[in-house]
Image (tube, rainbow, N blue to C red):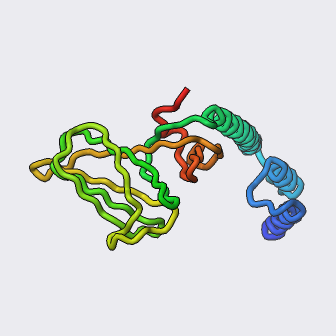
Amino acid sequence: MSIDTTSYYESLLASYTDTTTTTESATSLTSDDFITLLCTELEYQDPTEPVDNTQMVDQMTQYSQLEQLTEMNEKMDTLTDALDAQGISSGLDYLGKEVEADGYTINKDGDDVSSLYLTLDDDAAELVVNIYDTSGSIVDTQTFTGLEAGTVSFAWDGTDYNGDEADDGNYYVLATATDEDGDEVSCSTSTTGTVTGVSNSDDGVVLTLDDGRTVYLADVTYATQ
């Protein structure tokens, strides 16, 4: 006695299709799907050539691995949720505190413009500070000469190249420095502000400052007690 293999696979496919279409948009093979396929295979197998023990063990091993992966994914989701909650909880400790964090954003609100701090690793013969708006266009450029290594405060007057007052909003600062030989000098930027809000993102916990700017909790280098 023999069974038409074409009919066999058509039946197998039909059974699997009936199972998956009754679920909510199944896009991956679940453990239930695996059992359904295995039972269907046993039901439609050729009695004269049944599935041998080795093949059955291999399939059951695959099922066991699928179960373990599913359980692992569930545990990872739980761990991620716990870490997110822990991060938010840590961020809440900064509410109302003034923080200093790595960053390059300043905010203009009328005559009030955020201060930015520039740290030079070595003495700089020239320091060029470019100010960009949120569209990436340069609004103003300021140049300083003869600066010693260390941290200095940078304050923008809120005007553009033409001396006209710039629009209110956030701006970005990019500073580059060179020494007397024209070699680049490392220059980092940091900002300060009072934390008024805490949120979570794919990149980590975000602290919102009193002027609307945001910094990452991981970038905070100092906070008032």
Residue closest to the far front = 111
Q: Nearer the viewer, residue 81 or 221?
A: 221
Is residue 60 positioned above or below 172 on the image? above
Q: Nearer the viewer, residue 220 or 29?
A: 220
Residue closest to the far left = 181
Indicate the position of residue 108 as horizontal and vertical percent values.
48, 59
Residue 13 placement: quadrant: bottom right
Residue closest to the far top = 225
Quadrant placement of the N terminus: bottom right
Indicate the position of residue 15 as horizontal and vertical percent values.
87, 62
Image-based side of 79 in relation to 187, left or right: right
Residue 130 placement: quadrant: bottom left
Image-based side of 55 in relation to 146, left or right: right
Q: Residue at x 53, y 30 (%)?
A: 224
Image-based side of 14 in relation to 146, left or right: right
Indicate the position of residue 46 as horizontal and vertical percent values.
83, 57
Q: Residue at x 33, y 73 (%)?
A: 162
Quadrant placement of the C terminus: top right
Q: Residue at x 25, y 56 (%)?
A: 128
Q: Is residue 66 visible?
A: yes
Q: Is residue 76 visible?
A: no
Exactly how many numbered labels are in the figure? 0
Q: Nearer the viewer, residue 124 or 57?
A: 124
Q: Residue at x 86, y 55 (%)?
A: 40
Indicate the position of residue 36 as horizontal and vertical percent values.
86, 53
